[in-house]
Image (cartoon, rainbow, N blue to C red):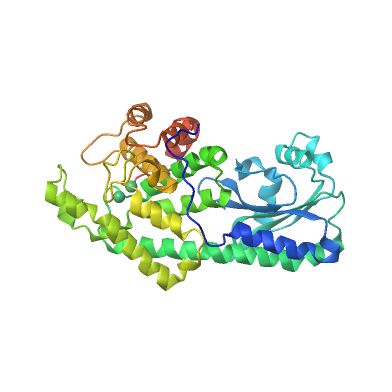
Amino acid sequence: MTSDVARKTLPAMRQGLAERLFCLHDEIKGDGDLTALSRIAVALYDERTDILKTFIHSSDGESPLDHSSAKLANLPSLQELAVTGGRRTINDLKVVAVTGQEHATRLVACGYLSSYTVPVISKGKFFGFLFLNSVCKDFFTPQVIHRLRPYAELIAQIVMRELDTVRMMHAAVKVIRQVSTVRDEETGAHLARMARYSRLIATKMAGPYDLSDEFVEYLFQFTPIHDVGKIAVPDNILFKPGKLTVDEFEVMKRHVARGLEIIDMMAVDFGMQSLAYFTVLRNVIAYHHEALDGTGYPHGLRGDEIPLEARIATVADVFDALTSERPYKKAWTNQQAFDLLSELSGTKFDPDCVAALIDSRVEINEIQARFEQTVFD
Ligand SMILES: [Fe+2]
Ligand SMILES: [Fe+2]
């Protein structure tokens, strides 16, 4: 899928959660009884679509489950843990694998023979799972589990703290939106859909572009904030039903710079500079109106000068705008939107992002059915 257009290296980032998990894993293995703990992985849960998705991992051997997602409803034993808060020990994964259970089969294929699963629950809410694996059968004895408990707790806390920062920022943006007049096209449903389209595109591109699950998750978290700067656009321009004049369009364009100012102020207030993927958020805001051929704004960047996260967000945003009804237009069919994106693929839009989106028809239908309403979040 990779074209010559766009293999952009992501900017140098502060240490992400995956790196921190890797260091912690090393520490844990230094504890005599726990040397054979071969893999630690965290999966996150998206309550609104019931999707459980791989997030970060530290694995001694091959990683069996990158870029995986599944509906929790289709994983009854995990679903039970999510509800009850119970833990699950499987001391012989081969026994589960022979029943055809896909995840177990993949784990066994990579040499893991036992597993211990802990649901991550905070203040009564389920956030995901911590998966621990060993290449040894019968590794998770009561004694080992007892030794692991504080480490498992610590990992859950680190992940939750980082996600709390993101959640706090979302809450702040929601308040900003509610007290401001940005209520036209940027409905909760639009943002929920475009975030999930972005996640679909990034997941499809993850292999060829070597994107981590952590990057994909942050992109999903951050894309709904792309237009926060619109609160600075006066109502008469923001809500104008017809075409904007040249001067009005100039004012409209300022929402990009204003968005960056807002997010930078929030970064100081919420201590978000320590967030490893803060750059992803800034790039989505700064470059979501750039076009591959240099005709976008505000910088007129070309091709892979535009960071990948912004190229993904642009395709997701435009696709949702086309397929949504607006006061001045009817909703296009998905096929009509795909046709336009294909036509402009390579000139305005990143061809790999467009191809990844078009390759996701089934998932797109599901997202559209789930977030049909145009109400505010
Ligand atoms: Fe925008
Ligand atoms: Fe948008």
Position of 318 with respect to 207 (left or right) is: left
Instruction: Determine the image quadrant of residue 35.
Output: bottom right
Looking at the picture, tell me which residue is in the foreground, 253 or 320.
253
Instruction: Determine the image quadrant of residue 126.
Output: bottom right
Position of 173 with respect to 108 (left or right) is: left
Residue drawn at x 64%, y 63% is 156
Q: Position of residue 130 (x, y in %)?
A: 68, 56
Looking at the picture, tell me which residue is in the foreground, 82 or 268.
268
Instruction: Determine the image quadrant of residue 101.
Output: top right
Position of 48 with respect to 346 (left or right) is: right
Above or below, 336 against 316 in this view is above
Residue drawn at x 62%, y 45% is 72
Check the image and name the residue furthest to the bottom. Answer: 269
Above or below, 47 against 258 in this view is above
Q: Position of residue 376 (x, y in %)?
A: 35, 52
Residue drawn at x 39%, y 41% is 316
Q: Quadrant of the C terminus?
A: bottom left
**Is residue 42 something that shows in the picture?**
no
Looking at the picture, tell me which residue is in the foreground, 127 or 297.
297
Residue drawn at x 71%, y 46% is 77
Q: Position of residue 119 (x, y in %)?
A: 67, 57
**Is residue 171 something that shows in the picture?**
yes
Tally of numbered discs: 0
Q: Position of residue 287 (x, y in %)?
A: 34, 50
Looking at the picture, tell me which residue is in the foreground, 160 or 260.
260
Above or below, 108 against 341 in this view is below
